[in-house]
Image (spheres, helix red, strand yellow):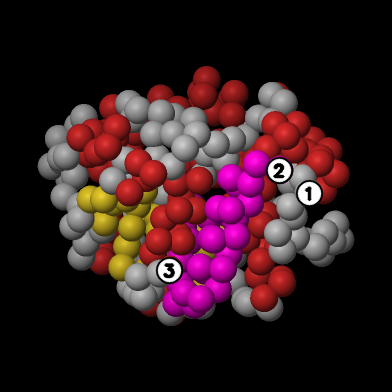
Amino acid sequence: MKFYMSYWSGGYLKQPESYLINYHKLCAHYIIQNHGEVHLITDSNSKDSFNSIPYATVSTELDSLSPNLNWALGKLYTYKKLSQQGDPFLHVDYDVFAKQPFPENKLSSSVLVQSIEKILPPVRWNDLDTFYKYCPNKGYCNRDDVNDISYNTGIFGGNDLEFINKYATSAFNLSIDPANQDGYQRMNQGGECWYLPTIFLEQYYLYQCSKHFNVGITTLLRGGDYDGHWFNSDMRQLEYVHINDLKDRNGFKAFKEKGHNKIVQLVNRKLREAGIELA
């Protein structure tokens, strides 16, 4: 199993600020400590920001991407690229801090993600309607509002490279399809829904592909946004934190006002304890 991180400056955070670089440092530190090495796929605009992190390799292949409403396009490209290389892999988001090793029984899964999520919070259902109404290319989507779910991809990868390639290639092509851009823009109307195309095209679409190809998905954490008891229990046991998940649970505005600085301070403290220089 090979471990990867990625950063695309075409996403919503653009050039990485110092706190983001420190997120990368702590994430990479835990992966290297537990699994030996980690690789980075990024672009030329961001590469120098990560020079102090001991990645095994650094690629700037994300230079090939054009601006897109799907901020996760760099991740989808990375999944697609890695699935073609022939080695089982796990991609870890830079805001995921896993102090304990990922369990071997999880790493042997066909496809591994962080956790299950509801399809969309109620305030976003209209945007799901928008996709099915205004996007002519629906890929492998077959809507079932009763049974459909979504996946949190704070971590993503596995051993079924054929399926991963089908999913990532289709999701990437769906993201850049000119015929769908008007529909994505309609989903991108501000408020609580401004990041909807990304959630839809990476997380919701992964479930749609797993349903279409009849492929089972394993979760690292039990429960999810519908069941905090098991979810929080597994996070404590694995000493696992995903910052974006905290944002989703507490609300982006509340997190930015009250939680962001605390997280930054905690990350900085963990880096100092490990003897790692701050950005």
Callout 1 secondary element: loop
Decide: marks 2, 3 in contact (CB < 8 A)? no
* Label 2 vs 3, first from the N-terminus: 3
Toward the viewer: 94 or 185?
A: 185
Decide: marks 1, 3 in contact (CB < 8 A)? no
- Residue ID at (59%, 71%): 217
- Residue ID at (70%, 31%): 185
The Cα atoms of the two marked residues, 1 and 2, are separated by 7 Å
For residue 57, which numbered disc appears in the image? Answer: none
- Badge 2: how crowded within 10 Å, few (<14), some, or many (20+)? some
Query: Which residue was labeled with disc 2?
Result: 179
Residue 186 is inside the magenta segment: no
- Badge 1: how crowded within 10 Å, few (<14), some, or many (20+)? few
Quarter of the rendering containing residue 86? bottom left
Quarter of the rendering containing residue 265? top left
Decide: marks 1, 2 in contact (CB < 8 A)? yes
**Residue 279, x across and y down, in percent:** 21, 30
- Residue ID at (63%, 46%): 177
* Label 1 vs 3, first from the N-terminus: 3
Query: Which residue was labeled with disc 3?
Result: 83
Toward the viewer: 127 or 103?
A: 127
Callout 3 secondary element: helix
Residue 173 is inside the magenta segment: yes
The amino acid at mark 2 is Ala
How many discs appear? 3
Query: Which residue was labeled with disc 1?
Result: 136
Placement of 220 over or under 216, stated as above or below:
above
Please provide the residue range marked out in magenta.
151-179
Placement of 27 over or under 183, stated as above or below:
below
Position of the N terminus, as image quadrant, is bottom left
